[in-house]
């Protein structure tokens, strides 16, 4: 019979991934990271798709892919085409299944800037072979996320989202350009999985995605949020 008083671990339990919270000593424990594809019309078009042809679709990164803003990372293995994708990140403090948009929005704890690092050459090969994107999106250190700003039960106000490489602007749009806003995305996702406290949702990237070379620093900014920056060695 299971008895947790006598359990020993054959390997040490992993460290809990977390995000810092602006202005607070506490930490936000991260459970899962969901991402949505093609949520800005111009980005969908630059990738060769009709932005209004289908409902939102989702993929995942492991929570262990999370790295904090300000990190310096090695250039990822198995790729010659690492890309940046600036994104608004939603953090949930509650959850549920088959939520209405109002119920879904009530689950929100706060927001952060994020960078959905992508091995674009692996993604292109997976698409051509009609295979999953896992190794293009869910690799080590592929989710760069800044500190959380609490904003419970509400959408983040409209503002500019941008990505720069060594200060040169690469991506720029308004959050209001999203095809499916936060409440709609969360409601759609809750019809597929039961959302839970600690879940993060990366809400898609605008047009202008492109490469990050060795030695470059990419910074994602969203009005009112702490930036998310990463340097690639």
Image: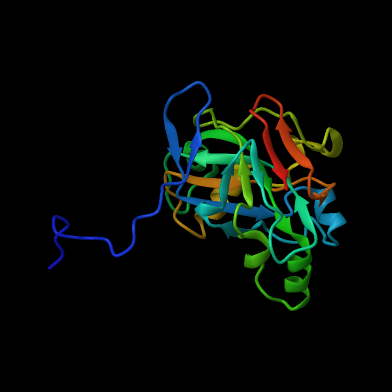
Question: Residue at left 42%, top 44%?
Answer: 197
Please tell me how many numbered marks the rendered image carries. 0
Please identify the quarter of the rendering in which residue 44 is found.
bottom right
Please state the horizontal and vertical placement of residue 177, each as a whole percent of the image: 77, 40
Please identify the quarter of the rendering in which residue 158 is found.
top right
In terms of depth relative to the viewer, which is nearer, 41 or 166? 166
In terms of depth relative to the viewer, which is nearer, 18 or 202? 18
Please state the horizontal and vertical placement of residue 18, each as a whole percent of the image: 47, 41
Please state the horizontal and vertical placement of residue 55, each as a whole percent of the image: 68, 58
Q: Is residue 3 above or below residue 22?
A: below
Question: Residue at left 41%, top 47%?
Answer: 16
The quadrant of the picture occupied by the N terminus is bottom left
Q: Is residue 184 left or right of residue 45?
A: left
Q: Residue furthest top?
A: 23
Please state the horizontal and vertical placement of residue 213, each as a whole percent of the image: 81, 50
Question: Residue at left 87%, top 55%?
Answer: 46
Q: Is residue 189 above or below residue 156?
A: below
In terms of depth relative to the viewer, which is nearer, 180 or 121? 121
In terms of depth relative to the viewer, which is nearer, 230 or 47? 230
């Amino acid at each position: 019979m299971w008895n947790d008083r006598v359990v020993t671990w054959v390997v040490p339990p992993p460290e809990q991934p977390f995000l810092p919270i602006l202005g607070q000593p506490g930490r936000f424990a991260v459970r899962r990271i969901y991402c949505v594809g093609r949520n800005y019309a111009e980005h969908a078009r630059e990738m060769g798709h009709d932005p209004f042809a289908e409902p939102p679709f989702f993929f995942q990164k492991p929570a262990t892919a999370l790295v904090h803003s300000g990190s310096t990372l090695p250039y990822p293995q198995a790729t010659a085409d690492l890309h940046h994708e600036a994104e608004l990140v939603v953090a949930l403090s509650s959850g549920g299944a088959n939520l209405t948009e109002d119920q879904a929005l009530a689950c929100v704890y706060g927001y952060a800037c994020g960078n959905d690092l992508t091995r674009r050459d692996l993604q292109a090969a997976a698409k051509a072979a009609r295979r999953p994107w896992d190794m293009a999106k869910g690799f080590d250190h592929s989710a760069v996320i800044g500190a959380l700003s609490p904003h419970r039960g509400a959408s983040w106000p409209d503002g500019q989202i941008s990505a720069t490489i060594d200060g040169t602007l690469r991506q720029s749009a308004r959050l209001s350009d999203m095809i499916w806003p936060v409440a709609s995305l969360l409601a759609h996702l809750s019809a597929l999985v039961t959302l839970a406290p600690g879940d993060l949702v990366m809400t898609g990237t605008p047009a202008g995605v492109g490469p990050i070379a060795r030695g470059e620093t990419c910074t994602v900014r969203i009005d009112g949020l702490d930036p998310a920056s990463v340097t690639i060695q």
